[in-house]
């Protein structure tokens, strides 16, 4: 029997609530499809940080390296640890160290969920570049506090970085409905985004079966609201993708449904799967968190591990629960009730 080794990092707040819930569902799927998940739990969190001064041990990255995947809840407890510390002490180093350059997020309405738009039937996969671009961290400030103060933040786009994310976008489009929208702004950004467009055209030659359209970020934002059903796969830079995926989460009904994966496509290191939401201190530990985003992220992990039938069954179970009205609005059902409904649906379809 295949055993997948999972590094489980529940983190803080509802990160713990939703990973506990989701692991029950993932274990049930594993049992049904004849494999096992072997989680090793790492209690790396803001609490650890307060006790030890670090979000994870000095050799944390080396501890994670041997795992088949990393499954994370959420980190952050702003009342005691500044968000810049919790983010830069755990999440960002993991994404960088394992070259998880593709951040992917599915946006669609689950059955029974209304969302703020009247749009129906959209199914978007958003792919965000996760390592460079506008968030490269290149810049500086001089003459701080004086009237001649200067701040710069340089966006860095490398051929390697752009080419690989665009290629990843084409691969995903090929496996779906065959359409890729490349998010750009080459009318205004005449170096980086013109380069982005050129690379897109060059890579497109390798994928004659995929249609590709460039679209400016501003038009894209409007399109996601006005006609999301026309979109299939979207590929975007770090900043543009960051913004569009929050919009995507909103149109699919909110953070309770937004799943994500940080993928290292060449598998030189483990990939990381996590719900988009944070640790939600306002509802932590009170059986109020919607675990669907975490369960869906877990399904993405199963697919990445080669367990596609199990991943499909988990998604079908989520859909069957929401189709019956479970968890479709904030506050309607508790974490336990939603988890139980998904588990029951998983059994039913067996
Ligand atoms: P948040 O996502 O934790 O919460 C925003 C709002 O959405 C809150 O009202 C919360 O109750 C609600 N919410 C979020 N997820 C929910 C769920 N599954 N079910 C029901 N309601 C849900 O964002 P916020 O409040 O800005 O950040 C709280 C902490 O989380 C901060 O320390 C922040 O840095 C951290 N954070 C961590 C992330 C990560 O680990 N990837 C991502 C975003 C924030
Ligand atoms: Mg964001």
Image (tube, grey):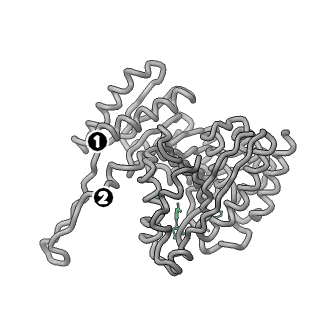
Q: Residue at point 66% right, 43% down? A: 302
Element at label 1:
loop
Residue 298 in the image, given as x and y percentages of width and height: 65, 49
Ligand 2 lies under 8 Å from the Cβ of mark 2: no
| Observer-nearest of 222 and 198 | 198
Mark 2 to mark 1 CA distance (whole Å): 14 Å
Q: Is residue 283 above or below residue 261?
A: below
| Observer-nearest of 74 and 44 | 44
| Extreme-left residue of the structure | 148
Q: Residues within 10 Å of mark 1 (few under 14, many from 20)?
A: some
Image quadrant in which you'd find residue 274: bottom right
Q: Quarter of the picture for ligand 1?
A: bottom right
User: Which comes before the other along the chain, label 2 or label 1?
Assistant: 2
Q: Residue at point 22% right, 61% down? A: 152
Image quadrant in which you'd find residue 215: top left
Task: Confirm whether residue 142 shows in the render.
Answer: yes
Q: Is residue 254 above or below residue 300?
A: below
Residue 63 in the image, given as x and y percentages of width and height: 53, 58
Residue 309 in the image, given as x and y percentages of width and height: 72, 35
Quick check: 348 left or right of 12? right
Q: Which residue is mark 2?
A: 137
Task: Confirm whether residue 221 shows in the render.
Answer: no
Residue 158's tag is 1
């Amino acid at each position: 029997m295949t055993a997948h080794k999972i590094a489980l990092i529940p983190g803080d707040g509802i990160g713990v609530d939703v990973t506990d819930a989701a692991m029950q569902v993932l274990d049930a799927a594993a049992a049904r499809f004849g494999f096992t998940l072997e989680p090793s739990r790492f209690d790396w969190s803001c609490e650890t940080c307060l006790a030890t001064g670090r979000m994870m041990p000095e050799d944390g990255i080396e501890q994670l390296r041997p795992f088949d995947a990393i499954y994370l809840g959420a980190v952050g407890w702003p009342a005691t640890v500044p968000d810049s510390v919790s983010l830069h002490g755990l999440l960002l180093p993991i994404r960088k160290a394992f070259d998880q350059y593709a951040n992917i997020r599915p946006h669609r309405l689950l059955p029974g969920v209304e969302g703020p738009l009247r749009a129906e039937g959209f199914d978007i996969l958003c792919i965000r570049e996760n390592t460079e671009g506008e968030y490269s961290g290149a810049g500086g400030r001089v003459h701080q506090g004086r009237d001649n103060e200067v701040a710069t933040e340089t966006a860095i786009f490398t051929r390697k970085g752009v080419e690989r994310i665009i290629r990843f976008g084409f691969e995903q489009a090929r496996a779906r409905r065959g359409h890729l929208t490349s998010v750009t702004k080459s009318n205004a950004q005449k170096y980086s985004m013109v380069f982005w467009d050129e690379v897109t055209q060059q890579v497109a030659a390798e994928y004659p079966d995929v249609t590709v359209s460039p679209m400016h970020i501003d038009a894209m934002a409007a399109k996601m609201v006005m006609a999301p059903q026309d979109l299939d796969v979207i590929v975007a830079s770090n900043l543009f993708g960051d913004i569009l995926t929050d919009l995507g989460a909103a149109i699919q009904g909110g953070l309770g449904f937004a799943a994500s994966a940080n993928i290292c496509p060449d598998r030189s290191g483990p990939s990381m799967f996590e719900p988009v939401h944070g640790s939600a201190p306002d509802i932590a530990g009170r059986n109020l968190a919607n675990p669907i985003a975490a369960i869906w992220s877990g399904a993405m992990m199963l697919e990445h591990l080669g367990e596609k039938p199990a991943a499909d069954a988990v998604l079908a179970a989520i859909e069957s629960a929401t189709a019956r009205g479970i968890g479709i609005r904030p506050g309607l059902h508790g974490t336990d009730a939603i988890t139980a409904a998904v588990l029951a649906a998983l059994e039913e379809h067996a």
